[in-house]
Image (tube, rainbow, N blue to C red):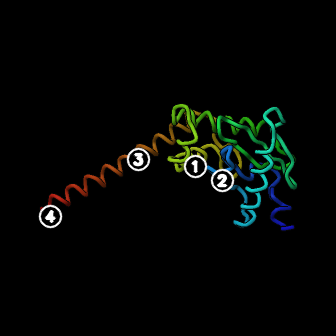
Amino acid sequence: MHVALQKLHERPNGISFLLLISRQGRVRLAKWYTTMSTRNKNKIIKDVTQLVLARRTRMCNFLEYKDSKVVYRRYASLFFVTGIGHSDNELITLEVIHRYVEVLDRYFGNVCELDLIFNFQKAYSILDELIIAGEMQESSKKSVLRAVGQSDSIEEAETSEDSLARLSSGHARG
């Protein structure tokens, strides 16, 4: 057995990974907060996906995996899955997952799997505003949405400037 798999959770507290998995077992988003090889990440994804998808609806949302715990919650067609240490609180982790879903809902207006497929970069940036290094950094939905909105405004301004520059360089040639 690989040491990285045996020591999935290297630090005592915090989230090791967050996965968004469809009911068909497709990974829609994967964020890792511990360093490990691609091979080990793929093994964890495969194992955890099989464990979560095999569970019935009424079963507990916590399960043991290697030397850590997996906490998950299903929203519509997606499972939000996290890996945490044995000393971490499962209920707080469920709240972190729920906060992420709430912010996604506000940003996209009733988020669905397709929003995350076509706007995955935005899903990652929202997650990065909420969680840094496996710990929740910002619990305020308004603050997260404000930061993401400011980022959107900057991107739109840069895109507009690029478009105007291309248009004016095209007219200069003609």
Residue at the far left in the pictured view? 174
Indicate left or right for 154 with 161 as reference: right
Which residue, given by chain and number where applicable, does mark 4 sit on?
173
Identify whether 1 is placed above or below 124.
Answer: below
Secondary structure found at label 1:
helix
Are the residues at dot 4 and dot 3 in contact (C-beta closer than 8 Å)? no
Indicate left or right for 39 with 128 as reference: right
Residue type highlighted by circle 3 = Ile
Residue type highlighted by circle 4 = Arg
Are the residues at dot 3 and dot 1 in contact (C-beta closer than 8 Å)? no
Are the residues at dot 2 and dot 3 in contact (C-beta closer than 8 Å)? no
Q: How far apart are labels 3 and 1 at the CA level? A: 17 Å
Which residue, given by chain and number where applicable, does mark 3 sit on?
154
* Rendered location of residue 166, percent (x, y): 25, 58
Secondary structure found at label 2:
strand
> Residue at left 51%, top 32%?
109
Secondary structure found at label 3:
helix
Q: Earlier in the sequence, mark 2 or mark 1?
A: 2
**How would you rate the neighbour count of disc 3 (Cα within 10 Å): few for under 14, some for 14-19, many for 20 or more?**
few
Question: Which quadrant of the figure has residue 62?
Answer: top right
> Residue at left 73%, top 38%?
73
Indicate left or right for 20 with 54 as reference: left
Point out which mark residue 34 bears.
Answer: none
Point out which mark residue 31 bears.
Answer: 2
Which residue, given by chain and number where applicable, does mark 1 sit on?
124
Residue in the foreground of this view, choosing between 165 and 58:
58
